[in-house]
Amino acid sequence: MNDKLIIFDTTLRDGEQSPGASMTREEKLRIARALERMRVDVIEAGFPVASPGDFEAVQAVANAVKDSTVCALARALPRDIDAAAEAVKGARRARIHTFIATSPVHMQMKLKMTPEQVIEHAVSAVKRARQHTDDVEFSPEDAGRSEIDFLCRVLEAVIAAGARTVNIPDTVGYNLPHQFGALIKTLRERVPNSDQAVFSVHCHNDLGLAVANSLSAVLNGARQVECTINGLGERAGNAALEEIVMAVRTRRDLFICDTGLDTTQIVPSSRLVSGITGFAVQPNKAIVGANAFAHESGIHQDGVLKHRTTYEIMRAEDVGWSANRMVLGKHSGRNAFRTRLQELGVAFDSEEELNDTFQRFKELADKKHEIYDEDLQALVTETNLAAENERIKLVYLRVCSETGETPQAEVTLWVDGAEQRANASGGGPVDASFKAIERMINSGAQLLLYSVNNITSGTDSQGEVTVRLEKGGRVVNGQGADTDIVIASAKAYINALNKILLPTERAHPQAGQPI
Ligand code: KIV
Ligand code: ZN
């Protein structure tokens, strides 16, 4: 029997540390549900002490998720650990992940602590976390640049104090695969009580080696990998979940372990994360890129038609790619609609939410005769977004765009319970609409990103728009979808404005620790 490789997803924590990828509580919940459907073992939901909003998001995930362990991050500080414990206490299975840096540069320059003080803090943090749960994970931050003798001492001490998982981060993505694999092997051999903990790895992608380093660690005995959907994460990102999982599964001849994941959920989850964060997936990205299973050259196409294994090492359907399939149309009833959404793993919180989404499905079916799974997913996203658009809603939009004339927009919004109307002109209809909206809201926010993608193919496809705004150092993403891309753009802009108007203050987990 193969060993189990534990998949620890940190999209909601390290992934969210990507500049511009911040997520609301509702968005985190949607991603957490997708991860649970994929049967991810551990979901790191956030860093509760960072802000009241982060605390509430972790708490909401802990209360909603039943099948995966829900984990919260905490620096090696009593108040961080207590906040993490409080946030995950509603979870069926709760984990606290505490960390402190162990590399010379971090200890001297960032923490301003001696190695002995670092060990003391690490041990007391683990002991304090163990008072709340048996499932405690410890990470020596920047282990990839730490001295091996010191690392062995720290790990021995935290395992003795009760850490059940020890996670070895290559925080700055500095290691090479053979070196990182050897590090894991040495630690397992030299730490006297290493058999009492699961060895985990957490690799960053600064040299493009996060997945290679993680796999090398697995070949050397690591049995948990920390990763994110689409490789999202600080700077160049973390190891991509989809690549780790499919490498281990495809090369069963080399790995003596496997994950328990439902890999058919990979592509839907990738799309969900990319839509919410506005981080597009590059077309040639392994597993989840649009071209990952496309064969352009005649020789390859011929080979695949004769036998698919000539040029394919995995089956597209095994990772969740499905050909655009017409599932429903104008005459489909409520039951067919509900059933198809259930098959896609979508459940509604209330009958009212189902009715509202069904109503919008009917409106869409009038404009677009063939409704695909992707269209249904966009409708559900719209339902979820409606709940976020508390202060500002789009009531009416009219644009006028003709050759040789300046485009004009007329927009009516519902703002804090009252209707407002404004006109504006702009370089194009989208620009004019955004200017009209800003004339009413006066947000002062700066537009960082505007991107449009078609949800399916064809000119009647819905356009899915992401808008990223920045104000006072805070960055948010808004989404909108419609068969009319100007309306989709206005919806995305309004969604982003609703988010940026919410007050939040947050701390960064890896900034200097006021110990
Ligand atoms: O990269 C890192 O070191 C981390 C730790 C908190 C595990 O994210
Ligand atoms: Zn990290």
Image: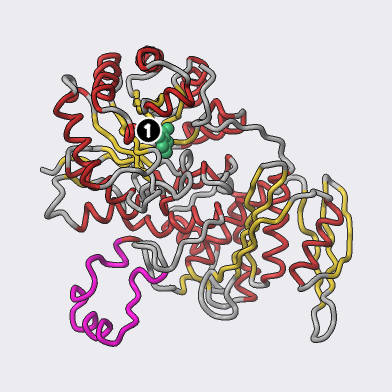
In magenta segment, residue 316: yes
Q: Give the residues in magenta.
A: 290-318
Ligand 1 shown in quarter: top left
Q: Alpha-carbon neighbours of circle 1 within 10 Å: few (<14), some, or many (≥20)?
A: many
Q: Left of 359 or right of it: where is 135? A: left
Q: Is residue 67 visible?
A: no
The quarter of the image holding the N terminus is top left
Task: Name the residue beneath numbered marker 1.
Answer: 142
On the image, the x and y values in percent for residue 483 come to 64, 72
Identified at 66% across, 42% down, the residue is: 474
**Residue 165, percent across and down?**
29, 28
Q: Which residue is drawn at the image coordinates 16% and 20% (left, top)?
A: 192
Q: Quadrant of residue 223?
A: top left
Label 1 CB-ligand 1 distance < 8 A: yes
Residue at 31% in and 33% down? 168
* Residue 18 image offset from top left, x and y in percent: 52, 46
420 shown above or below 201:
below
Task: Check the image and report above or below for 217 versus 366.
Answer: above
Q: Position of residue 439 (x, y in %)?
A: 86, 56
**Nearest to the observer: residue 469 or residue 242:** 469
